[in-house]
Image (tube, rainbow, N blue to C red):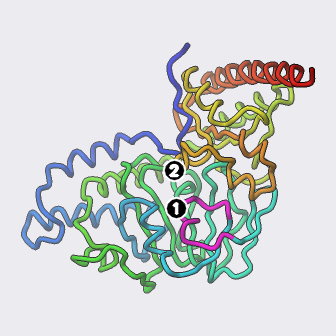
Amino acid sequence: MGARVYMDWNATAPLRQEAREAMAAAMDVVGNPSSVHAEGRAAKALVERARAQVAAALGADGADVVFTSGATEAAALALAGRGLMGAPVEHDAVRAWIDAVLAVDRAGQVTVPDPGRSVLQLANSETGVVQAALPEGLALSDLSQAFGKLPVAFNWLGCEAALVAAHKLGGPKGVGALVLRRGLDVDAQIRGGGQEQGRRAGTENVIGIAGFGAAAEAAARELADGVWDEVAEIRNILEKALDAAGGMTILIGNSGPRLPNTLCFAAPGWKAETQVMAMDLAGFAISAGSACSSGKVRASPVLRAMGYDEAVAASAVRVSLGPGVTRTDVERFADVWTRAARRQAARMMREDGAAAR
């Protein structure tokens, strides 16, 4: 078996060196950002620098960036008590707060009849499907998966608010942000000292926030340099290899725009969690659906919403790549997965034959 290959970047991206260095430097800054003395002002300066870095990378200059513990908390802050609508393809963190009634077609595109009362993700973490367009006046968009992988400008999207997470683009886990159109307010869910413009109390996670800012800045440079176009080429090589594997795979979400790194496919009859374990033993880290739903033995609600039956939805896995994953890596994965799929198909045929007798 060769070296392990990490192919689960949509769950979390490896920590960038720029973020690591920014966090290490922030550890030496003693003060509380709310203190008015020199040490406090130094800590506050790190937070505000990161706020500007995230805003610039996201094309959100002039918007309010509210730091949170992650996109899940940002979703709660933005959505609690509002009764907004969304689609079943939204992440669990968003779906927990909405009425998931919006229609989804086979390609993963969502119909939004009332944008002002609706939320809509830009890119889906499981399938990689990117919405062809976000309707003007959308109440909120989850940009967590798109940020850093696609050219995104919050100020041009026309939505009122957005969610982002640091660890999806090479920042630390446990920090994210709610981005609000300037002048828009939300009711604080965590109350206390009035930090983050009174929207989210609690001493700021200065170290994590500094890492988030550095990662966002680095991600923007990487995107401009065309790195994710190269990742898309590697993804396409893997897709062609799996598609040529004797008709054992159903490719999902590939009929329209997708994230450049994501490939979702199914082998009906071979449970997704079994595939993940088999590939893990072979040295490849992949996933079955959203990482936040891991451990739950259930068919993907995203695929069910797209019209796939239980057999497909229960057997779908996701490969999500990043810079550094090579052509050799994906060709080796395709070979290992295809041989395992053939063994599984033969086993199923034997079992069906035994049952028939």
Q: Which structural element holds mark 2?
A: helix
Q: Is residue 94 magenta?
A: yes
| Kind of residue at badge 2 | Cys
Indicate the position of residue 220 as horizontal and vertical percent values. 47, 53
The magenta segment is 88-100
Identified at 55% across, 62% down, the residue is 143
Q: Is residue 19 left or right of residue 319?
A: left
User: Residue 292 — which label?
Assistant: 2
| In front of the other: 141 or 326 | 141
Q: Nearer the viewer, residue 281 or 225?
A: 281
Please give left or right for residue 292 compared with residue 255 in the image: left
* Residue located farthest toward the top when viewing the structure as drawn: 1
x and y percent of residue 72 in the render? 46, 61
Q: Quadrant of residue 151?
A: bottom right
* C-alpha span from label 2 to label 1: 9 Å
In this view, 254 is above or below 134: above
Which label belongs to residue 93?
Answer: 1
Q: Position of residue 84 (x, y in %)?
A: 60, 78
Residue 235 position (above or below residue 223): above
The N terminus appears in which quarter of the rendering?
top right
User: What residue is shown at x 58% (from left), y 76% (from top)?
Assistant: 159
Q: Amino acid at mark 1?
A: Ala
Q: Quadrant of residue 272?
A: top right
In the image as oriented, which residue stretches furthest toward the bottom?
A: 183
- For the image, the number of numbered tags is 2
Whether label 2 touches label 1, CB < 8 Å: yes
Residue at the (80%, 50%) spot, across then down: 308
Packing grade of label 1 (10 A; few <14, some 14-19, many >=20) is some
